[in-house]
Image (spheres, rainbow, N blue to C red):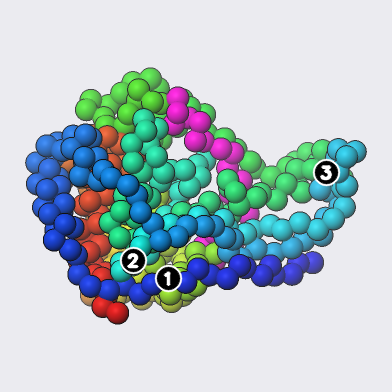
Amino acid sequence: MSTPLKSAPAPRLPRWRGSGTALMLGLLLSLLPGLQACTALTPSTEVSSLQGPLVIGRQGSFFVGGRTIASGTLSTLPAYAAEGRVAIEQMYVRYQVPVDARRVPITMIHGCCLTGKTWETTPDGRMGWDEFFVRRGHPVYVVDQVSRGRSAANTTAVTAVKAGQAAAASTPPVFMAGQEAAWAIFRFGTEHPKVHPGMRFPLTAIEEFWKQMVPDWIGTLPTPNPTVERLSELSQRLDGTVLMSHSQSGIYPFQAAALSRKGIAAIISIEPGACPEAKGDLKPYLGLPIMVLWGDYVDTSPRWAPRLKACREFAAAVRQAGGRADLVVLPEIGISGNSHMLMQDDNSLALAQYLWDWLDRAVPPKAR
């Protein structure tokens, strides 16, 4: 038996307004030539254009959704009762809102075996995409998927096995990604410890990256994944947000749009684990600006090459149906060396600027 949890009041957002300032335009012009020239931008050049105090109007955190269950398998430890009620399937959200924000909020969703840390400071200490987009005038909301990070997992099924109240075969499939396997999945190389020529992930800080990885409880969740429902709820609470996803979560914004278009201003999907079926119902995506961004070395990966092919087919089908779906493979526009973790590669801020420019055209600031 379960009862809905009441969510905290949604933070009030200022309306978007105005157009980019001369400073924004100058920064844009200074960065875009580097993108066109592939490697002209260095990390120090990118950061130098974004130096200075980070000024925000407010920051905070809250949970979206969730439900309460009663369980008799909460604990096997004498100090903690086995019976009681707990909250599950809530989604944690951390946010920062710039002073006088005029641009559309961005919600960032991480992928497999990771948390919202994906979008924060890079393993080698550079600015993350969360800060970049705040500095560019966007309220930014970083989530932990349901049952990941600060969105607590439901461990009752595991405890039931430990307590002898359930068969071992009923243990839910919780997993961790080993560093050797993750090396190929994230396309640092075809196999550990080989490295793709020119690969741009900061391997000097690889140990810091491995610390970001956490157990993945997705196999314990119901269908549809509660994270999708929470993203739909959050989009409506914010009254407009860009859903920016990565890898495992790449499909979630599309699934949320299929539930309801309310509050979804655009979708940016970074190397999605899946795109919607090209021959499926495309109506939820028509009239919605979509960007699907891919890095390098995809053709070397039996995991990712078929997924890129399917995403190409989806984007083409959306365009043929009259919608807007931009699919960009970075080597095809002259930018080489990017891994699966584009937001942490050494040209991450140049890529963020590329997306900012696309978003500025797709969802321009609105006047109050």
Q: Amino acid at mark 3?
A: Ser
- N-term-proximal mark, 2 vs 3: 3
- Kindly report which numbered mark, 3 or 1, lies closer to the viewer in this rendering: 1
Say what secondary structure mark 2 lies in. loop
Q: Look at mark 2 in the image and give the residue it sits on.
A: 101
Crowding at dot 3, Cα within 10 Å, few <14 / some 14-19 / many 20+, comes out as many
Q: Which mark is residue 13?
A: 1
Q: Residue at x 30, y 36 (%)?
A: 345
Q: Earlier in the sequence, mark 2 or mark 1?
A: 1
Distance from Cα at disc 2 to Cα at disc 1: 8 Å
Q: Circles 2 and 1: CB distance less than 8 Å?
A: yes
Crowd around label 2: few <14 · some 14–19 · many ≥20 (10 Å): many
Look at 17% across and 41% down and name the residue there.
Answer: 335
Q: Are marks 2 and 3 in contact (CB under 8 Å)?
A: no
Q: Position of residue 292 (x, y in %)?
A: 29, 55
Give the residue type that dot 1 points to: Leu
Q: CA distance from mark 3 to mark 1?
A: 41 Å
Seen in the image, is 98 located left or right of residue 327?
A: right
**Viewer-nearest residue: 270 or 314:** 270
Which element is circle 3 on?
loop
* Magenta region, residue range: 207-229
Residue picked out by circle 3: 75
Q: Can you give x and y, in whole percent of width and height, for residue 263 in the image?
A: 42, 73
- Indicate whether residue 149 is drawn in magenta: no
